[in-house]
């Protein structure tokens, strides 16, 4: 019957971690599941941060002592206070040992009396047990992808039966189940990260832009925060691809992505993204229009200095300016896209800002013009005539190569 109960507890722990939607939910499920399985009153999950030389607590679950937070921001312990972390998990296990669990008691001695117990390492844990009114604990190393990741800690209160060797062996099994759950969460996190990341440049992708811009415009509507969108078109990519090959073109995209990231870092709370093909953007939430324009000017300057390509056409739309009410991400996109289109048509070396020429700004007229029948929301304005960008320069239409084919959604086809 006891074996059946423990098997159910293992299944419950695994199911709890599988149902978690966030890392915190996963950590809590692991700690609570292990505590329940071992008949504990408290459990903690900690990660070994090698680069910081510390054991950092991720979650405290169950009956917490005064001062213990469920998700502590800064609860960590130098590993020199816990020699078993570095000696056993790193040295012994690396030399062929197994990551087994052990028991400590508040009276200062390990339970079980086997050679695997770490007597002499317990002074910090014993002090912690006494300080927090606990009688014993079992510590199980967590191994992830072949490396010591951290530990699972389960405690019982004073007066409760002390953990024995069978409990420690069971804790080792539970730690393995926890490791499997953590690995699954990491895979899900990586899949989610990839879903919002451009594979070539490592920047955010169009999906991430849509989500971020919708959220930003909603903040503008409810809080009045300034939202700015910078849309960039990398000039000369087709010529680089045709002349030097697509591998060189990809390197140009990567290098410009790095430049975009660098200039985006000039503005706090700014997302740098690749929309697709040769198009990129920055979403700035909070910085003033002047700050955004300065960053965009630096971007244009650095793009001109790239070894290949012909610089960048850059358009800016911001909720802080004479563009009229901006109540949707779609309108902000159309404004920035129209400004970028005018920069492309006029072959300007710096950014074009929507609305700077007042109510009759050609960019506003282009952005607000109805799309052609069957056109999409953004790329529909590609290939349309744009008012002349300069006095009598005769360039009233888009230069060759600006028009882009679109798919049924109106999105750019790289």
Image (spheres, rainbow, N blue to C red):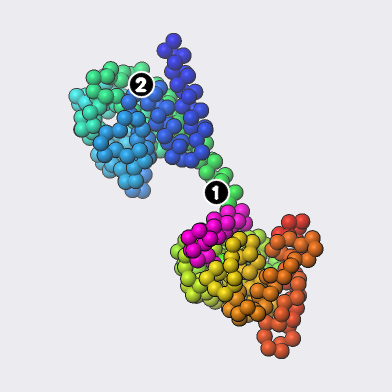
> Quick check: can you spot residue 322?
yes
* Depth order, front residue of 113/353: 353
The magenta stretch is: 202-228
Element at badge 2?
loop
| 130 relative to 313 in the view: left or right | left
Which residue position holds label 1?
A: 193
Residue 205 painted magenta: yes
| 100 falls in the magenta region | no
Residue 333 is situated, as x and y percent measured from the top left of the image, at: 63, 64
Alpha-carbon span between mark 2 and mark 1: 37 Å
Between residue 113 and residue 58, name the one nearer to us.
58
Q: Position of residue 301 (x, y in %)?
A: 54, 76
Q: Quadrant of residue 335?
A: bottom right
First of labels 2, 1 by sequence position: 2
Furthest residue toward bottom: 392
Kindly identify the residue that appears in the image at 74 percent across and 67 percent down: 370
Seen in the picture, residue 16 relative to 327 is either above or below; the reply is: above
- Report x, y in % for residue 326: 59, 65
- Residue appearing at x 19%, y 24% in the figure: 107
Secondary element under disc 1, as helix, strand or loop, is helix
**How busy is the neighbourhood of tag 1: few (under 14 within 10 Å), some, or many (20 plus)?**
few
Q: Position of residue 400 (x, y in %)?
A: 76, 75
Among the 4 quarters of the image, the one containing residue 156: top left
**Which residue corresponds to mark 2?**
39
Which secondary structure class fits the magenta region best?
helix
Camera-nearest residue between 399 and 97:
399
Q: Residue at x 35, y 38 (%)?
A: 70
Q: Is residue 87 left or right of residue 204?
A: left
Q: In percent of the image, x 25 and y 27: which residue is there?
A: 134
């Amino acid at each position: 019957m006891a074996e059946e109960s423990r098997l159910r507890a293992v299944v419950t722990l695994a199911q709890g971690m599988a149902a978690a939607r966030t890392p915190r939910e996963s950590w809590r499920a692991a700690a609570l599941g292990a505590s329940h399985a071992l008949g504990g009153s408290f459990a903690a999950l900690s990660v070994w941060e090698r680069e910081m030389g510390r054991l950092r607590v991720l979650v405290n679950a169950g009956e917490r002592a005064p001062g213990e937070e469920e998700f502590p921001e800064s609860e960590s312990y130098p590993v020199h206070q816990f020699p078993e972390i570095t000696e056993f998990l790193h040295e012994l296990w690396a030399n062929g040992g197994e990551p087994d669990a052990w028991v400590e008691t508040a009276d200062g001695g390990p339970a079980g009396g086997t050679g695997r117990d770490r007597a002499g390492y317990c002074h910090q844990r014993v002090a912690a047990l006494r300080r927090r009114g606990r009688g014993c604990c079992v510590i199980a190393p967590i191994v992830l992808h072949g490396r010591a990741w951290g530990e699972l800690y389960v405690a019982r209160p004073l007066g409760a039966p002390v953990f024995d060797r069978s409990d420690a062996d069971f804790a080792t099994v539970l730690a393995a189940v926890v490791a499997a759950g953590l690995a699954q969460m990491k895979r899900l996190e990586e899949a989610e990260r990839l879903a919002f990341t451009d594979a070539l440049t490592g920047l955010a992708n169009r999906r991430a832009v849509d989500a971020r811009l919708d959220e930003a415009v909603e903040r503008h509507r409810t809080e009045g925060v300034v939202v700015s969108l910078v849309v960039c078109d990398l000039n000369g990519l087709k010529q680089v691809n045709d002349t030097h090959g697509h591998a060189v073109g990809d390197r140009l995209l990567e290098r410009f992505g790095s430049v975009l990231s660098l200039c985006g870092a000039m503005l706090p709370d700014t997302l740098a993204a690749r929309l697709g093909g040769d198009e990129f953007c920055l979403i700035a939430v909070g910085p003033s229009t002047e700050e955004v324009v300065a960053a965009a000017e630096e971007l244009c300057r650095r793009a001109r200095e790239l070894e290949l390509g012909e610089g960048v056409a850059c358009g800016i739309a911001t909720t802080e300016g004479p563009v009229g009410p901006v109540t949707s991400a779609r309108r902000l996109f159309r404004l920035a896209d129209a400004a970028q289109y005018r920069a492309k048509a006029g072959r300007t070396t710096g950014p074009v800002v929507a609305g700077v020429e007042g109510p009759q700004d050609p960019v506003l007229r282009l952005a607000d013009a109805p799309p052609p029948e069957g056109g999409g929301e953004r790329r529909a304005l590609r290939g349309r005539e744009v008012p002349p960008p300069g006095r009598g320069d005769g360039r009233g239409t888009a230069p060759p190569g600006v028009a882009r084919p679109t798919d049924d959604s109106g999105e750019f086809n790289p």
